[in-house]
Amino acid sequence: MKKMEKKGVAPVVATVLLIVVAVVGVALLVTFIMPMIRESMVKAEVCSKARLNLDDACYDENLKKLFVRISRGSEEFQLEGAILQIINETRTETKKMSGGEIDIGILESVTIDIQREYRPDAVGIAPIVKTAEKIEPIICEVTTRIPVRTC
């Protein structure tokens, strides 16, 4: 009879160990995965409101300058800057602009000029947004891409 009682302890210990391993696994997932999911959700929410529009883009062959008119919608967000993509058939360049270079209020627009030795085919823009939740600004995806015409 004593042998039967000792054999009955091993399944209980195994069950407790499995439960402990499962709880530790869930705790690790919550600790490491949830912050990444939360950060992605914050970025998606912020970037859905942070919209910059490219109203016009033209290249002046004589001045070798690209002129881009950027406007902002009615949504409230803190614009930290923007990344302008300058695209032609052989390469894509990016130009990071600070908030001072594109100081745009709600429902306002600004025209910037950029010295370029080649004629771009298209331009795109991605807003950089400052949030209260994060120390680092959020770089959103390119929201608008338009072709470049000749001025």
Image (cartoon, helix red, strand yellow):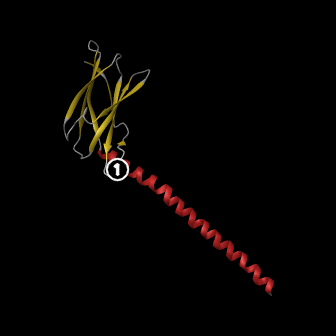
Q: Residue at x 61, y 66 (%)?
A: 21
Q: Is residue 65 left or right of residue 91?
A: left
Q: Amino acid at mark 1?
A: Glu
- The residue that disc 1 covers is 45
Write down the quadrant of residue 116 in the picture: top left
x and y, in percent, of residue 68 in the image = 26, 27
Residue lying farthest to the top in this orientation: 62
Mark 1 falls on what kind of element? helix
Query: Residue 106 or 56: which is nearer the viewer?
Result: 106
Q: Quadrant of the C terminus?
A: top left
Figure check: 66 above or below 1: above
Q: Is residue 101 left or right of residue 6?
A: left
Q: Residue at x 76, y 81 (%)?
A: 6
x and y, in percent, of residue 25 in the image = 57, 62
Query: Residue 144 or 130: which is nearer the viewer?
Result: 130
Q: Residue at x 54, y 63 (%)?
A: 26
x and y, in percent, of residue 111 in the image = 22, 28
Mark 1 nearby-residue class (10 Å; few <14, some 14–19, many ≥20)? few
Figure check: 148 above or below 8: above
Figure check: 110 above or below 26: above
Q: Residue at x 21, y 31 (%)?
A: 110
x and y, in percent, of residue 139 in the image = 37, 40
Q: Quadrant of the N terminus?
A: bottom right
